[in-house]
Image (cartoon, rainbow, N blue to C red):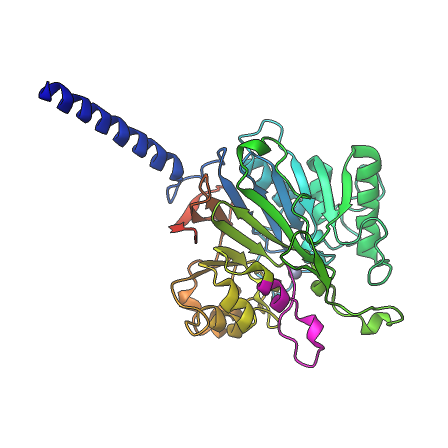
Amino acid sequence: MKRKYLLRNAICLLLIICAVTAVTTSLRAEDVVGKEITHWQPGMIDIHQISTGRGNAGLYILPDGTTLLVDAGELEQKTSNHTPDRPDSSRPAGEWIVRYIRHALRHDPKPSLDYALLTHFHQDHIGGVTGDLPMSRSGAYRLTGITWVGEELPIGTLLDRGWPDYDYPIPMTKNLMSHYRNFVKWQVEHNGVKAERFIPGRNDQIVLRRDPEKYPQFEFRNVGINGEIWTGEGTATEHHFPSFEGVSEKQLPDENIFSAIFLLRYGNFRFFNGADQAGIRPNKPDWYDTETPVAKVVGPVDAAILDHHGYVDTMNEFFVSTLQARVWTVSVWDDDHPTPGVVERLFSEKLYPGPRDLFALDAHQKARDSIKEFDRIASTQGHIVLRIAPDGGEYRVVIVDNTSESHKVTKIFGPFQSKK
Ligand SMILES: [Zn+2]
């Protein structure tokens, strides 16, 4: 009798060990340094910052496979102030982005973008326009950045800060905007794209499209745009900018401060993206600083992208000490990004205690020479992939070679445990 009982216990224990091993193995990304990055699997979130040397492009693969592209930039002109084109200059940035997306979505026989979000209307986020760029098949606009992506990949919903009138704070008539607006119009009228203005405060504008019931612990919160910021209660917002009525174009604030800002949650995991918002405002009125009101409502996060590429006008002390990210990433390809003062604040234990790591997309030589703590930056070159495990309990940072299309992993960091 006793032996039978012991045997039963031993079998139970074995089954439990097998189950636990299966669970932990499934949580573990199988990435190996020197090998191609493994593809996304259901339940995971992958956040890719794609390195082109010519602007921002962020691909988000959500737990049920819903896809979101945040920005797709192309600089009009490259100079020695920028890092080299990635992987090289043989293709435009938009084409490299499409090729990268197709690889990242190779689990899907018909890759598409459920959402494209353009945070604001600068060339490094939507694509600059020059005369030698090819025209679209429609003949209505040139192919650059997001318009190139839209020519090659189907887009479900396109969100930006201006639809449908594109008139805040003043009518947007620049060359870059006339091509972009023709692109949106064409996509809506001929390709069935739904265009929407990104509405601050809402958590039902970017949702899981493929299997939402399975992942109730996922939420995408629109935190702010056009200076209107979520209060943290329901979907209520507050306006932080004054009226710009009657203000001349020259006196208008920079496009950056109108950026779309969001917070993504998955179980305990929290990720913040403030696009090109500002937080330090010498000789400017207080309302230029949106970092402070945004930090108050966002609170501590696990991972975040540095605001405005870590430029001199960002990452104020209150913002850094409130977000307290374990992982900071920065989208850089320019010699002013990130600035030494920003890096000093990020690493300052006075602002918040505990370990933290910074990952840079592609650091310029000037940054290498001028940043005192440069050697503390965990990675200074390569596509940055945040891989969040199913349930959001832990995550890794995987760095992928940006000098070719090998998609080879060059470094792996973590696992990091999400904050409770
Ligand atoms: Zn930018």
Q: Is residue 135 magenta?
A: no
Answer with left or right where residue 153 lies relative to residue 357.
Answer: right
Q: Residue furthest left?
A: 2
Q: Which residues are magenta?
A: 275-296
Answer with left or right where residue 141 lies relative to residue 309.
Answer: right
> Who is closer to the viewer here, 365 or 288?
288
Instruction: Return the x and y of residue 391 as percentages of the image width and height.
Output: 46, 40
Residue 339 visible in the snapshot: no
Instruction: Return the x and y of residue 294 as percentages of the image width and height.
Output: 62, 63
Answer with left or right where residue 238 lies relative to residue 212.
Answer: right
Q: Residue furthest bottom?
A: 283
Q: Residue furthest right?
A: 246
Residue 51 visible in the snapshot: yes
Q: On the rendered image, what quadrant is the N terminus found in?
A: top left
Q: Is residue 159 above or below residue 4?
A: below
Count how many numbered circles sit on residues in the image: 0
Answer with left or right where residue 376 lies relative to residue 297.
Answer: left
Instruction: Return the x and y of residue 299 as percentages of the image width and height.
Output: 53, 61
Q: Is residue 287 magenta?
A: yes
Ligand 1 is found in which quarter of the picture?
Answer: bottom right
Residue located 85% across and 43% down the image: 140
> Who is closer to the viewer here, 191 or 315?
315
Q: Is residue 241 above or below residue 57?
A: below
Residue located 79% across and 70% down the image: 242
